[in-house]
Amino acid sequence: MKKRVYVVPHSHWDREWYFTIEDSNVLLVENMDYLIDVLENDTAYTAYVFDAQVSIVEEYLSLRPEQEERLKKLVADKRLFIGPWYTQTDSLLVHKESIIRNLLYGTKISQKYGHSMNCGYLPDIFGQNQYFPSIFTGFGIDNSILQRGVYTDQLKGDLNFTWISPDKKKVKANNMYFGYGPGKFLQATEEYKESRLYPILEKLSSMNRHTDQLLLPSGGDQVLIRKHFPETIQKLNKETEDYEFLLSDYETYMKDTWGDYHRFDNEIEGELIATQNARIHHTIRSQRYDIKKANYEVEHKLLHQLEPLAVIGHSFGLRYPQEWLDKIWKLLFDVHAHDSIGGCNSDDTNKDIIQRLQKVKRIADGLLNIWKKRMTEAISSKQHDLSSIFVFFNTNASEFSGVVEAVIFTKSREFILRDTVEDTQVMAEVKRQKYVSGGKQIIVTAEGEQEVEIPGYYRNSIMVAMDNVPSLGYKTLKVEKVNKRLPTVIQEESTSIANEQFEIKLKDGQLIVTDKKKKIELDHFLRFENVADAGDSYDFSPLDGDKPIYLEQAELISVSKGELSQFMVVKHEALVPKNLKERTENIASKLLMITTTLELRKEEHMVRVKHDIANEVEDHRVRVLLQTGAEHANQSFADQGFSIIQRPITNSYMKSWREDGFTEAPVPIYPLENFTGNKSDTHIFAAVTRGIKEYELLEFGDLALTLYRSVGLLGKDNLAWRPGRASGINNKVVFTPDAQMKRKMTFEYAVVIEDSNVEPSQLFVRTDQYVGRYVTYQKQDLNTFEERLERFEFPMEIKDLPKTASILKQENPNILMSSCKRAYNNESIIIRFYNPTEKEQQLELSHVFPSLNVTNLAEDQQLEVNKNLIITPKAYLTLSLK
């Protein structure tokens, strides 16, 4: 019986890489014109897959709008396959909601053109998120085809397997063992068949023990459609007795091959990051830290501030800014393409990525400014005595209490904040107070233009104790002039700071952190490691003979204390080699200085940490080493998607990875979404980060967070952990001096210590507390530059809002809100909750909406709601509220 070979012609289209997005788009138009012509003129060319990302289709049609009907017909006839992605997103460096949003836009837009490919196609991303099976099924996608991340022994003799996510959702999956290009140069010549084609098919046959149907992806990066493929297939079928070749697509292959579902009994669970058959680039998570940090802050601004604030405003009558959000998300999806967010690009491309992120931030800041001002003016208009008010908008689904930092402008140094409902003074203190000149204003008079001096004012950076701010709502404080100043954070002669839970002291150059309630003391709490990086933009590489330089001795700079917050500033410094040449010559000529600010806030269960570095060194890596107090841990954990993932601190495959022919070393260096840590018999230690995306749990309990890598090459052969060819570009080295990261950088995270038996949800709660799911706004006429649009006029739209309000509240502490936005079709509000625990949890919900339904991730499947809304372990629930 002949084995059937499904030849799938395709193009993997990188939006940008060592080339810019403009280079890509110019080529795109030429190739797409030709592709449409070939498919229309040759009906034997049954199908072509255009990389599963619809962004390139939109880009093409923006320049060739006259081609839309031709393209739509090919898509509707399932001869040209597009979607389900908007862009081929990385899955381990972006927020879980960004992945979901990418598929939402991708499927909806693809369906508009005629069809969205029913395949979770993952040809080239650097590792697979453990929640992909669940996310795919949430969009009605029941299969996935992927390349990277699977160990051969996991497959158990079948390239087809069932892939399971932590919430037990399943998809049918196929591993492209030879990648997405084994048939790229398909020919019918005897030499090609004997030397290349048949050996590949024999290997594929040996790895498909339960089927005679073989998948042969036949494409590559930015390739032109192979016009000869139908004729080549015909020739191969005439000349081959063992195989039947057919021109096909991924949907057809999976449908035909999985017709008898039960013949593939192998199941693989969770994250896929194996380096055996394809490179994962574990240390790309710390490449171009500036991109990772900027992306993190933009995602936070969109998901945790702007979208939920717009929902609150929409509930009170404001128009939801859907068009702007569509624009923002599409710009961001281009950043999230695997090479783009990875930072493994030319300097020109990375400049474009940074500029894109800046553009998104500016748009989001402007929208936040307008929506905050509109609601604040509506609150003020009803209360005529509230000429200067400060509004705290809680953009989370649970009540907020805690100490926050905010900016208040006042005419005098003396003021207080008063709760407008309780009529009580709110506890606050001044962190910094600066006098600002009012400048001059030009006034037109009958005598001509005149300059008028404007009185000065004070910019006050304050710490405020907010208490019980309503969920998805707000609380209003009055800024009141008095004759007594607020307490001030004052610099003191001291070597320690403390709050109710922690004490931090500097003794003999060492930082010591004590958890007073748990009686845990962490000596040598914080130090830094500096090593050579002989790698490239894809991978860190140790330098042979290099020894780490440790920055262990801390020098006290200052200690400042207030009633609500305390700060300690220290510095670590050492002379280090300025480049690889000095490393090899054992010379150290550059000063590496790291300034660290440690902050404790009243009744807050975390230590806030900030490092400032002005990097002048090339070809090196800097990590902070945190003492966790768990010396014998054999596993680390991190969050990924809607729950926690456990990972070993040693990888058994490391012993013989070279002998076994691995494409790169399976080093136990891992990605994180928001937090990472370890667990001992006495406690859990975790670090919640803001844009730091790489960690390693070291022997004896040190948690290493990679702050940044500094390299100047895109592409390098024969790295210590990555033998053979350079990644990406063969026989070409692209110099990337910007990737040396010679600039000022800030790194932020918080350290959390919890009881060893605490629910995982507590770490997600701490994450929300640290990142700050809220925004603030002051109604004032003193400063019009702090927020960019203050100087301009725009319609207010609504009036007469109450002093405090809430539109929804969720009270189960083990359930968290992941997303709050308007539905894609603009007909309802979408709110997603998740349960990261091992037990079922009941949603305890109260809200102002008249209608509530359960929907899928695609937001198009409405189900009736029972009284008891249950979220199963490690799962999520999406609600549609009208």
Image (cartoon, rainbow, N blue to C red):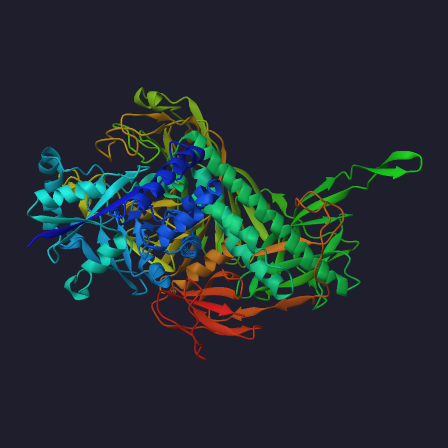
Q: Using the rendered view, name the quadrant where residue 709 is placed.
A: top left
Measuring 49% from the left and 31% from the top, which residue is drawn there?
743
Measuring 67% from the left and 59% from the top, which residue is drawn there?
375
Between residue 83 and residue 80, name the one nearer to us. Answer: 80
Percent x, y of residue 280: 28, 43
- In the rendered structure, the answer to whether residue 445 lies left or right of residue 553 reads right
- In the rendered structure, the answer to whether residue 333 lies left or right of residue 358 reads left
Percent x, y of residue 870: 40, 74
Q: Is residue 680 above or below residue 20?
A: below
Q: Is residue 584 above or below residue 112?
A: above
Between residue 717 and residue 200, name the one nearer to us. Answer: 200
Numbered label tally:
0
User: Can I make out residue 1 in this image?
Assistant: yes
User: Can I make out residue 508 in this image?
Assistant: no
Percent x, y of residue 225: 29, 39
Quarter placement of the C terminus: bottom right
Percent x, y of residue 432: 66, 44
* Extreme residue in the bottom direction: 867
Quarter placement of the N terminus: bottom left
* Extreme residue in the front direction: 41
Q: Is residue 1 above or below residue 18?
A: below
Q: Is residue 261 above or below residue 19?
A: below
